Image: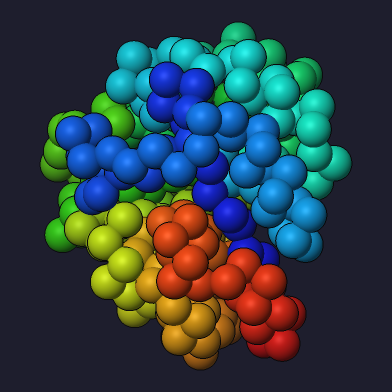
Amino acid sequence: MIIYPAIDIRGGRCVRLTEGRFDAETVFADDPAEMALKWAGMGAEWLHLVDLDGALAGEGKNLPVIKRILECVKIPVQLGGGIRNMAAIDKLLELGVTRVILGSAAVKNPALVEEACKKYPGHIAVGIDAKNGDVAIEGWGQGSGVAAVELAKKMAVYGVDKIIFTDISRDGMLSGVNAEATAALAKACGVPVIASGGVASLDDIRNLQKVAEDGIAGCIIGKAIYTGAVDLQDALALAKEG
């Protein structure tokens, strides 16, 4: 299982939100590139970047910061937030992003996902962010009326490389990852799923390892490594064991 340190970018800074609320923000670093170097230096194999401003605006808003991160680190990076058309996907992959994450577009423009998967096989992921099983879109600001499991099954048909499943109610809460829901989603759609939201301790990684056979491919850790609740090197070592 791969551990993905999260770097959420808003206004050019590295922040964390609570339950996806933009009015519940904590700034952890003025320079996200410094955080990227820190996590890479501690042994991270991947980085998970989110352009929070882009998620709200529907277009990339922190490209200079993202470019700097890509120039600083040598490990692969996956990026989501406001990626809504093929031109944006083209540009990000050309810049050096390894995996592009489509979120709202999966609900509002599924044809884009299908086209992107055909054009860039192995480089397209879909982020499914849900609260009580309902997919949220537009920076988590709106419900969609679409069930997370049904969306995952549809995306599987298109050939997405990974699905990133976030339980919004747990994100930034340090309340424990929803291993059961993540495993159920992976089992239902047959696509490797990266768990996100709520990681509070190494026990969350252990809980995900218990259901890894259902298709859990990784785990994104955000607030826990910024507050010190989880030591990234310990998490990486544990993930290698399972």
Residue 198: in sight, yes or no?
yes
**x 70%, y 30%: residue:** 69
- On screen, 240 above or below 130? below
- On screen, 151 above or below 198? above
Q: Quadrant of residue 234?
A: bottom right
x, y percent for residue 35:
63, 43
Residue 217: in sight, yes or no?
no
Q: How many marks?
A: 0
x, y percent for residue 209:
55, 84
Q: Quadrant of residue 48?
A: top right
Asked whether, in this view, residue 233 is left or right of residue 132, the answer is: right
- On screen, 45 above or below 88? below
Asked whether, in this view, residue 210 is left or right of residue 173, the answer is: right
Question: Is 12 in front, or is 162?
Answer: 12
Q: Quadrant of residue 115?
A: top right
**x 15%, y 59%: residue:** 132
**x 35%, y 30%: residue:** 104
Asked whether, in this view, residue 144 is left or right of residue 72, the answer is: left
